[in-house]
Amino acid sequence: HALNFAQVSKKFYLFDTYNGIPMDGLVGAERAKADSLNQSYFDCFEIAKRNFSPYPNASLVRGILPGTLVNAPLKKIAYLSIDLNSVSAEISVIEQLWDRVTPSAIIVLDDYGFKGFSDQHSAWNDFAKSNGAAIYSNPTGQGIIVKS
C-alpha cells in the first residue's frame, strides 16, 4: 500500500504450487524436509488470488517450476526470490532466467545459509562462480546476489 503498487508500471509474477512442495525428484534430506513441511501446507491459491486481486500488475502462476516458466512472458527481471527447497529445481530456474536478469537486479536465495542446506549452498556457489557473481550471506540465512 505504501508503494501504491497497483499504479507501478512493472509486472510482478508469483510462481508457486500454492499447495506445498512437489515431491517428484526429491531424495534424501530434501525429500524428508519437504515431507515434513508439506504437513502444514494447504491449497491457498484462492486466498492468494483474493489477496492480490487489487493489483492488476500482479500475476499468479500456479504450477511446478521450472516448467511453468515456459509460458511466462518474462523479458527483464529486476527482482527474483527463489525458495523451491530443491537444489535441482532452483539451479534449473536460475539457468533459464539468468540472461533475463537485468544488471543491478537483486536475487534472494531463501535457504542459502541455513544449516541442513549445504547442497543448495554449494550449488549456488558453483553457479555464482561460473557466472562471475558473488553471493552475500545475510544473518537470516538468505543469500543475496546483485547481478553486475
Image: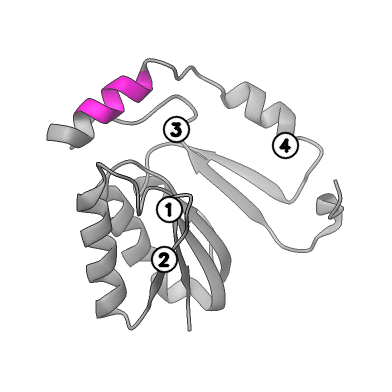
Tell me if mark 1 has few (under 14), some (14-19) or many (20+) residues whose alpha carbon lies within 10 angstroms of its own: some
Depth order, front residue of 98/40: 40
Q: Amino acid at mark 4?
A: Phe
**Can residue 109 be seen in the rendering of this structure?**
yes
- Above or below, 1 against 144 in this view is above
Q: Residue furthest left?
A: 28
Residue depicted at x 73% and y 31%? 51
Ranked by sequence position, the earlier of labels 4 and 2 is: 4
Q: Which badge, 3 or 1, comes first in the chain's sequence?
A: 3
Is the C-beta separation of discs 4 and 1 under 8 Å? no
Image: magenta residue range: 32-38
Q: Residue at x 59, y 50 (%)?
A: 13
Badge number at residue 69 = 1
**Residues under numbered marks 3 and 4 in contact, where contact means CB atoms less than 8 Å apart:** no
Q: How does the figure colour the protein chain or chains?
A: one colour
Q: CA distance from mark 3 to mark 4?
A: 16 Å
Q: Amino acid at mark 1?
A: Leu
Labelled pair 2, 1 in contact (Cβ < 8 Å) = yes
The residue to which callout 4 is attached is 52
Residue occupying the point 78% across, 63% down: 9
Disc 3/disc 1 C-alpha distance (Å): 13 Å
| Mark toward the start of the polypeptide (2 vs 3) | 3
Label 2 vs label 1, nearer the camera: 2
Whether label 4 touches label 2, CB < 8 Å: no
Which element type, helix, strand or loop, lies under badge 3?
Answer: loop
Q: Dot 3 corresponds to which residue? A: 17
Callouts 2 and 3 close, C-beta under 8 Å: no
In the shown orientation, is residue 122 left or right of residue 54? left
